[in-house]
Image (spheres, rainbow, N blue to C red):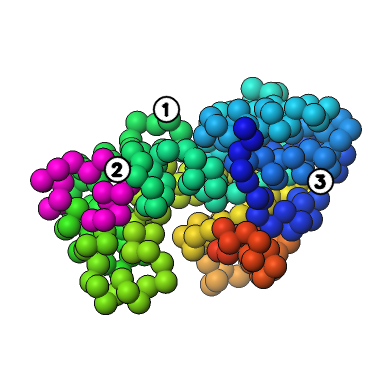
Amino acid sequence: MPIKHIPVMLPEVLHYLNCKPGKTYVDCTLGGSGHARAICRKIIPDGVFIGIDQDIDAVQNAKKVLKPFKSTIHLFHGNFVNLPEFLRQLKIVAVDGILVDLGISLHQIESSGRGFSFKKDEPLDMRMNFTSDTKAEDLVNTMEAGSLKKIFQKYGEERWAGRIAKKIKEERQRKAIRTSSQLAQIVWDAVPRKASGRQKLHPATRVFMALRIAVNRELENLDLFMKNFADLLNLKGRLCVLSFHSLEDRIVKTRIKTLEKTCVCPPDLPKCVCNKKQIVRTLTKKVVRPTNDEVAVNPMARSARLRAVEKI
């Protein structure tokens, strides 16, 4: 059965990627292949499509969804940070467009059985890639309370990180924390009643997000990718990034600004000696957000932010 999926900001993504027949494009995060299918439609005939996902379910689904297209299609199971290696395997030096969608898929939340959602009683796994060593349950059962507090604060911006970490430590001494429902209840009990009642989000929302980010090293991988992506683009090649978290967007924005800069010499030097050249130009002067109509149809798009650049 195909993965249930609604691609986020699809018209905007296609606009900024500027997909053309016969060109080469990469979808670094296949998900349900909604973006991938639309890209493939745009690049026929003779286009080359490269799809990557660290979730093997997404790769298997893509094989079915993209089968009707006559374009050259290459699919890889792995993390997008390894795109340079995948291109070397294909003997491709650079591509015309790259899409990175950093959102978690509806399939992973509803059907993967890996504990991404606190609404179900599932094993506390949270690995996007089953070959990874560390599960969420490993973190909550072995890390010091201070380290858990830092994860919840840094990745989840959780106000009650200290109380939650302390409660986790207390509960795991009685019984190992193995399921998503166990953890959700612990967080619920740790947050003051008045605070939990005023929150629009379930008290466990930020904790689950923080653990997922930590387990999959999402921010570290994104930062490394953003340092090197320009080397993988042809002249006038484009990068589009869909982020769903302020920390993700900050990394993307900061790296883009660095690549846009020309001179980085100290201001007191009489003339430039660094000879730094601008590498990309921003196509989205302000971050692009989904329309109200899209959010009404697909609430998961609510926090999406799109940034796009072109190599010059």
At label 1, counting other C-alpha atoms closer than 10 Å, the crowd grade (few under 14, some 14-19, many 20 or more) is few
Identify the residue at horizontal 77%, vertical 44% (top origin): 38
Q: Which residue matches tag 3?
A: 19
At label 2, counting other C-alpha atoms closer than 10 Å, the crowd grade (few under 14, some 14-19, many 20 or more) is some
Q: Quadrant of residue 13?
A: bottom right
Q: Are marks 3 and 1 in contact (CB under 8 Å)?
A: no
Label 3 amino acid?
Answer: Cys
Q: Which residue matches tag 2?
A: 179
* Frontmost residue, 203 versus 246: 203
Which numbered mark, 2 or 1, is in the foreground of this view? 2
Label 2 amino acid?
Answer: Thr
Q: CA distance from mark 3 to mark 2?
A: 43 Å
The magenta segment is 169-186
Which of marks 1 and 3 precedes in the sequence? 3
Identify the residue at horizontal 70%, vertical 45% (top origin): 35
- Res. 101 in view: yes
Q: Is residue 189 above or below residue 180?
A: below
Q: Position of residue 185 (x, y in %)?
A: 26, 56
Q: Quadrant of residue 269?
A: bottom right
Q: Which residue matches tag 1?
A: 131
Q: Are marks 2 and 1 in contact (CB under 8 Å)?
A: no
